[in-house]
Amino acid sequence: MDSNLAADLAGLPDLLTAARDYAAGVLDGLDERPAAASRPDLAPVPLPAAGVGAAKALELFRKRWAPGFSGSAGPRYLGFVTGGATPAALVGDWLTGTFDQNAVTRLDSSAVDLERETVGWLRSMFGLSDAHTGTFVTGATMSNTVGLAIGREWLGERRGVSVARQGVGALGEVSVLSGSPHSSIYKALAMLGVGRDQLRTVPLLPEREAVDVEALEAALAEAAGPVIVVANAGTVNTVDFDDLRAIAALRERYPFWLHVDAAFGGFAALSPAHAHLVDGLAAADSVCVDLHKWLNVPYDAAVQFTRRQDLQVSVFQNSAAYLTVPAGDPDLFHLTPENSRRLRALTAWFTLAAYGADGHREIVERNIAAARRFGEGLATVPGASLLSPVRLNVVCFTVDRDLPALLDAVARSGEAFLTPTVHRGVPALRAAFSNWRTGPADADRVIAVLRELVS
């Protein structure tokens, strides 16, 4: 055994204590850590022939790389839609690495059963039916990809072919309809061989990012054969919601696979004041929910739900003499692109067990309150204006200034991190509130920074 490896094994308790103490210090200072760090100009160094051992590697990391890491787990990182890691989720993440389970089969471990329990908790939290089975994946992009892959197989079933066996060419023309699809939908269609150009955007309601259901019905009437409809439960710019129940009702007249991208908007189900936004989610054939956003578990974790696990197995089954057959409740390597994967469910299990539905409801509602406070505070920022009502946890606004320069100045201040967008042709900024640490006081601090920078 390598001498450094042997020494680290012998001193493992002390190494873990040192890592714990360092991590605790980082977390203790997270509130004041720069939300966006300036990256040091570091050239790559060659791989060392002889290592230095874990203790010195930790010290090397602290000095060389940690200063360039952002405070993305902190309360004023408002870029993209980024959560943090609740204390319980962090415990789960450390134990995920400790047990190092390849969570795909029941042959040697209860890890798959833990994932099934966690999926059941999430299914209940989002108001889905017992008919919806679920599986953990890396993020919303992969969740959307899996859901659309199942939808692609459903199209084949309607046309008497199996895409999984015969290839996507057996399908012929494919139509995918959506109002305000996330960019990951286009990416998924490219990966699945359906093609980005097969997505047809449907007109939206006036001044909204929600699809016009009458226009969707007209598009369905024009389509030659069954199609895939991608509905949105929370758009990225304005967190707008399609009328899921009205869309699902169209299936009485037109055959289509209903996939709902509820990556973070699905968490509206936790708030009694906002649950109506996802009314009808249980009617979906497949659903995407991203967990490293508003569930506040570490990257990477999402879940994919579907009513047609049989078609899911048709797409993703993995056959080999040493693997279980995909019968009954199949092992997980029959359900997603991965044959090997970490036990992502453990972080979600820990945070759900620790704080329950009520604890996560409080996070969601506190974030919504912070977003609304931020939206109201923009009235005190010269040149700032909302581009959409604050419906949930994302504030879409613009400022009558050089926006790239303003974004850079906000990031360099260390107080906050925001991301740019374009809404209805207007260059804009997004502030997304989804971290369990974030509250109204953080909204006030970011407003104060903006006011100072534009005054």
Image (tube, rainbow, N blue to C red):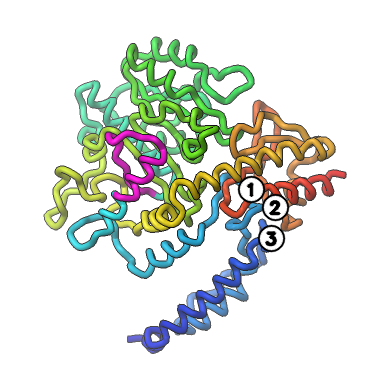
Residue under the image location 62 percent in, 60 percent down:
70
Residue under the image location 40 percent in, 10 percent down:
222
Q: Amino acid at mark 2?
A: Ala
Is 125 colored magenta in this rendering?
A: yes
Q: Earlier in the sequence, mark 3 or mark 1?
A: 3
Q: CA distance from mark 3 to mark 1?
A: 12 Å
User: Is there a contact, CB below 8 Å, between mark 1 and mark 2?
Assistant: yes
Q: Which residues are magenta?
A: 117-137
Is 138 colored magenta in this rendering?
A: no
Between 347 and 11, the one nearer to me in the picture: 347
Residue 78: horizontal and vertical position, in percent?
Answer: 64, 48
Q: CA distance from mark 1 to mark 2?
A: 7 Å
Residue 38 higher or lower than 241, as above or below = below
Which residue in the structure is indicated by mark 1? 78
Which label was assigned to residue 10?
A: none
Q: Which image quarter: residue 39? A: bottom right
Which residue in the structure is indicated by mark 3? 34
Near mark 3 (Cα within 10 A), the count class, few <14, some 14-19 or many ≥20, is many
Residue under the image location 30 percent in, 23 percent down:
172
Q: Earlier in the sequence, mark 3 or mark 2?
A: 3
Q: Is residue 339 left or right of residue 35?
A: left
Callout 2: SS = loop
Q: Amino acid at mark 1?
A: Leu
Q: Amino acid at mark 3?
A: Pro
Residue 416: horizontal and vertical position, in percent?
Answer: 70, 52
Callout 1: SS = loop
User: Is there a contact, CB below 8 Å, between mark 3 and mark 2?
Assistant: no
Q: Is residue 282 left or right of residue 215?
A: left
Which residue in the structure is indicated by mark 2? 416
Near mark 1 (Cα within 10 A), the count class, few <14, some 14-19 or many ≥20, is many
